[in-house]
Image (cartoon, grey):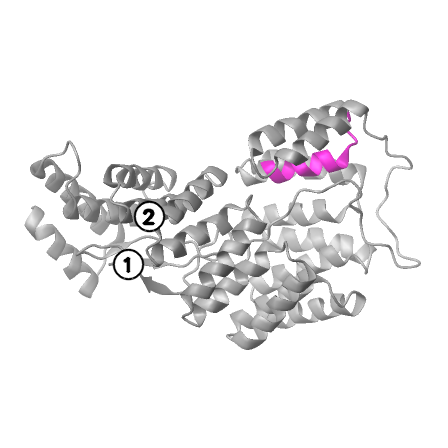
Amino acid sequence: MMHRRLIVWHATLAVAAAVASACASSREQRAPVAVAETEATAAVSKPGAAASPSPEGAAVPTTPATIEPPSAAASAAFGHGMTLVSSDASAALAAFDSARRDSPQFYLAQHNAGILLAGRGDNELASAAFRAALEVKPDFEPAAVAQARLFELDGKPGDAERVLRDLAAHNAKAVLVRAALAQLLARSGRFDEARTQAIEVLHIDERQAGAMLALGMVYRRQTQLELAQLALNQAIEGDGTLGEAYNELGLVFLAQDDNARAVQAFERAAAARPDVAAIQNNLGALKTEVGAYAGAVTALERATALGPARPEYYLNLGNALRGEQRIVEAAAAYQKALEVGRGDRQALYNLGVLYLDNEVPETDKMARDQKCVDYLQRYLKATAPSGDERRRVEEYLAPAS
């Protein structure tokens, strides 16, 4: 039996629940399953994307009197990049880079390059791209939202809030930014502020999907699951491509012990946002949970490609591969988690149990037993567990020692 912890959307991992796995094993196996709360994701922008209209008398951030239009070559490169976003992120990024090199004031290309750079973990370069977009068009809401997301991912929610509030202060009708602020407040546990912000946005635009998503996030965290489901369904009605809303809905269904509907919600989230590693990871994690290992491996391989710096994604991939009895590949995935996570304790445990339970090709029993002992002893040293936890690990060690 494998146990996993459900992680909460960004770099800070929080335990949401412990769920039992269907993976056949006589031992308890652990790994964090990244069923992530809605990640503060940002999407690539299409031509014509604009900031919300400014209220009369509002002081809008200074924008250059004229923005030089992109050249024909830059426009062609941008269009080519848009066709590749979902199928080949690296090629799409190369196209957006070409567009912004050719026309540095092409703020859409700057923004989209930033989104793809952030997706592969190049946060410094992504932040520079978002700043470049905002220097050209300071009221461009998608870039402000994306910049705030990077701050939040970097453990700087105060800076994220500042970016959003600065633009909102200049334009009270900046509904995209204000909805993002409501979501940030919800993730920060400031539920009353989040609810107020979301309701104010809905007074401006009663169908603003991001604001409904924020309300759903608040209600789910307060275990008002029926209200959460209602708000999230309304968010999806407002924007059927809002993968984050499907992701939150999946978490609602998990809280209701409805794995079948949770899988459906995560599948829709993954289809809507194939560029978001956490959402792909969630789908793979839950598919592992229900024994659909082939589909789990596919989703988790995509998650690790999109988020190569996240050790929990490799742990989840190892679990799915183990479920398919692809033991050598599972061991490699756990090793990668160990490498990326700088000695991740869960990876030590998983590797120890893997060598204890399975006949690893090209490894004799004595070598397997030694690896099991090495990994589990390192796990004990790293975690210093007590009580039942220590006794269980010591029982695993006894036959291998």
Secondary structure beneath disc 1?
loop
Numbered label attached to residue 22: 1
Is residue 350 inside the magenta stretch?
A: no
Numbered label attached to residue 195: none
Query: Total label count?
Result: 2
Q: Nearer the viewer, residue 378 or 47?
A: 47
Alpha carbon of mark 2 to alpha carbon of mark 1: how far? 10 Å
Near mark 2 (Cα within 10 A), the count class, few <14, some 14-19 or many ≥20, is many
Residue in the picture at 52% in, 70% down: 221
Q: Is residue 88 above or below residue 243?
A: above
Near mark 1 (Cα within 10 A), the count class, few <14, some 14-19 or many ≥20, is some
Residue in the picture at 46% in, 43% down: 303
Task: Judge whether residue 45 can be spotted in this image.
Answer: yes
Residue 228 rendering spot, x and y as whole percentages: 57, 71
Q: Is residue 234 left or right of residue 14?
A: right
Circles 2, 1 touching at the beta carbon (< 8 Å): no
Residue in the picture at 75% in, 68% down: 202
Bounds of the magenta span? 103-116
The tag earlier along the polypeptide, 2 or 1, is 1
Secondary structure beneath disc 2?
helix
Residue 23 rendering spot, x and y as whole percentages: 26, 55
Q: Is residue 386 above or below residue 378?
A: below
Amino acid at pointer 1: Ala
| Residue beneath disc 2 | 320
Task: Judge whether residue 224 can be spotted in this image.
Answer: no
Quadrant of res 94: top right
Residue 281 rendering spot, x and y as whole percentages: 45, 49
Residue 187 rendering spot, x and y as whole percentages: 56, 61
Residue in the picture at 43% in, 54% down: 34
Q: Nearer the viewer, residue 87 or 131?
A: 87
Amino acid at pointer 2: Ala
**Quadrant in which the N terminus appears:** bottom left
